Image (tube, rainbow, N blue to C red):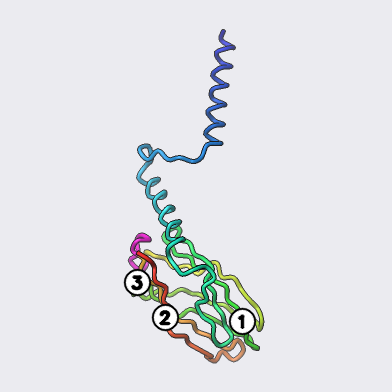
Amino acid sequence: MKKYLIGVICLVLMIASLSAYCAPETFDIEEMSREELHTLIDRARGQLIKYELFAETDTVLYDDNGIKITFKDFKYDNDALVINTIVENNADLALNVSFEKTYINGWDKYVGFFQSLEPGKKAKNDETVYRMEEVDVYSVDDLEMLEFKVHVVNGETYSTIADSDTITLIFKK
């Protein structure tokens, strides 16, 4: 009888563990800690903004002076906005490209985006990161606008080739 009871208990535990493993993820918010709830909300908010935030994927942000910058996608993660772009050098000379005069919601924000490209080459930039707490943005709901200028420099002489007009990305509310 003991072996039978132990066998039944093991079977029930095995079925329960398999059903938990195979079942779609569900959340019992009543059982979640405050930190778990905030993490869940931030992840959901980031995913929603991914669908609502910018123009379409593959939006050309800048196409002048031999440089083309295309917006690919973004994510909001760990209190940072990460913008992914592709930079193409279509000029006949090496060029350096940077983002200058960057503002988030009107706050001055140094980005540190820099790309050096030989003629006819492309680069994916997956880590253009904006730390939000540094500009009084504490949730994705506070994010309104990102502004920057593209600065293009000759890669050999370092002379300025162009400074773009301000490029503004509006975040939907």
For label 1, the SS is strand
Q: Quadrant of residue 149?
A: bottom left
Q: Give 168 or 131, whichever is nearer the viewer.
A: 168
Farthest residue toward the top? Answer: 1
* Range covered by the magenta-colored residues: 134-142
In what quadrant of the picture does the C terminus appear? bottom left
Measured Cα–Cα span from mark 1 to mark 2: 22 Å
Please report the residue visible at 39 percent of the width from the left and 71 percent of the height from the top.
170
Indicate whether 43 appears above or below 159: above
The residue carrying pointer 2 sits among few (fewer than 14), some (14 to 19) or many (20 or more) residues within 10 Å by Cα, namely some
On the image, numbered disc 2 is attached to which residue? 101
Q: Are marks 1 and 2 in contact (CB under 8 Å)?
A: no
For this view, does 95 lie left or right of residue 144? right
x and y percentages locating residue 146 in the rendered image? 40, 73
For label 3, the SS is loop
On the image, numbered disc 3 is attached to which residue? 105
Q: Are marks 3 and 1 in contact (CB under 8 Å)?
A: no
The residue carrying pointer 3 sits among few (fewer than 14), some (14 to 19) or many (20 or more) residues within 10 Å by Cα, namely some
Q: Quadrant of residue 102?
A: bottom left
Tag 1: residue type?
Asn
For label 2, the SS is strand
Measured Cα–Cα span from mark 3 to mark 1: 30 Å
x and y percentages locating residue 10 in the rendered image? 57, 21
Total number of numbered labels? 3
x and y percentages locating residue 68 in the rendered image? 56, 80
Tag 2: residue type?
Lys
Question: Closer to us: mark 2 or mark 3?
Answer: 3
The residue carrying pointer 1 sits among few (fewer than 14), some (14 to 19) or many (20 or more) residues within 10 Å by Cα, namely many
Tag 3: residue type?
Asn
